[in-house]
Amino acid sequence: MHTTWRVLAGSLLGAVLAGPVAGEPIFHLGPAPTRDQFPPNLFSLAYQPAPPDPMAPGAWEADLQCVEANTLEFSDVIKDSLPANPAARINLSQQWAEGIAAANPSLPVIFLFQMETTLTTLRLRAGTGLGGEAWLQLPVLGYSGGFEDGLIEDIHKLGFEQSGRAAIPKDQVRIVLIQDGQLKYYSNASSGPQVLDPVLGYTQRLLARPTGSLALSGQVKPALMPSRFDMRAGWDTGLQLSGRWSPLPALDLYYGFGGVHRESGSRAFNRFGFRDQRGAHLMVECLHNATWRPFFQLLYLSGSTFPMAGQRLNLPSLQHDLGVHWMLGRNQVLTLRYLNNITHNENTADMALMLEYSLRSGPAAP
């Protein structure tokens, strides 16, 4: 699961030895490809900021991203059953989950996700000419108990309390899915990498000016790969309008909005109540340094499900993505990012650490 981190670390070492090329930055890198890391949402198409500057004809880019996301989220009925100041952490065994199911036969869905997901994504982009660009995403997902729980609990001691953190074992996997009073899925074990459905897309430039650009991007996610947690998504499609405004030579502002249409999937997926989703992003990136480019991005998502008793998955979420691009050369970029949940509606991952390496060939978009 952590092989990708070693690959990225090796790439970083080689790039550092090669040395950055000052004065030859890659301009207009585009918004950060932030996506929601809440485990049930990883199997359907997500609103993800798309670059508004398609690559030039003959140019291509390969990008490898690894995201380590920590999630501790559960339905209200589980929250209400946990002691506020426990003397010891609760085991959350399968028998405990069966007891929760038996005590709540009228609730359509009860869930608990205590885990860290490792999502590794290879993105390939290629300019097709006439202001167009084709792209492909190949995601691989694994999960484990991880290593971030202790860090998060230390942060919460500063006053950002999260219900249940002190009651549930640290750095362990607990996955509970209850539907209509029946325990449908339970796991306390890590999982190795598994390929998820690919995403194919095409971006078409609508407007290009020295101080800005505008593009329309369409995506499709076929239903090809086996499911996780019995959550098999259907064929999903998305459409997004994205733009860039560069009011100053040292500043890029990215923005966009769009929607995702979700088709029916497995029974467990459908019973979860997933619906079409809307999203928007706003990002500011500072270009004053040829080597370092800090950025801050906000990602808004509408609720991912229809309203259901006992949870708040239907509420919107707002997440921030804070990071820096390290220009390792004219055609190489290393990006470090930190993603955090702002709204705390129990429908996103709590936090995530990200590492990306991008390699580009050919000229930048005109």
Image: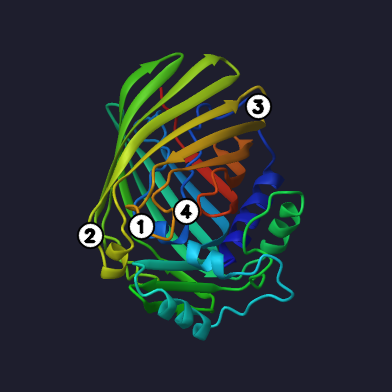
The amino acid type, in three-letter code, at marker 3 is Ala
Marks 4 and 2, the one that precedes in the sequence: 2
**Image spot of residue 255 (x, y percent):** 44, 28
The amino acid type, in three-letter code, at marker 4 is Asn
Marks 3 and 4, the one that precedes in the sequence: 3
Q: Of 37 and 206, which appears nearest the observer?
A: 37
Which residue carries the number 2 mark?
264
Q: Which residue corresponds to the image point at 60% horizontal and 52% vertical from the top-left?
A: 351
Marks 3 and 1, the one that precedes in the sequence: 3
Q: Which residue is most to the bottom?
A: 95
Does the residue at mark 4 contact the one at mark 2 (Cβ under 8 Å)?
no
**Image spot of residue 79 (x, y percent):** 55, 64
Residues at marks 2 and 3, CA–CA distance in whole angstroms: 47 Å
Which residue carries the number 4 mark?
347
Helix, strand or loop at label 2? It is loop
Number of the front mark, 1 or 4: 1
The amino acid type, in three-letter code, at marker 2 is Ser
Number of the front mark, 3 or 1: 1
**Image spot of residue 41 (x, y percent):** 40, 56
Q: Of 352 and 133, which appears nearest the observer?
A: 352
Dot 3: within a 10 Å radius of its alpha carbon, few (fewer than 14), some, or many (20 or more) residues? some
Dot 2: within a 10 Å radius of its alpha carbon, few (fewer than 14), some, or many (20 or more) residues? some
Helix, strand or loop at label 3? It is loop
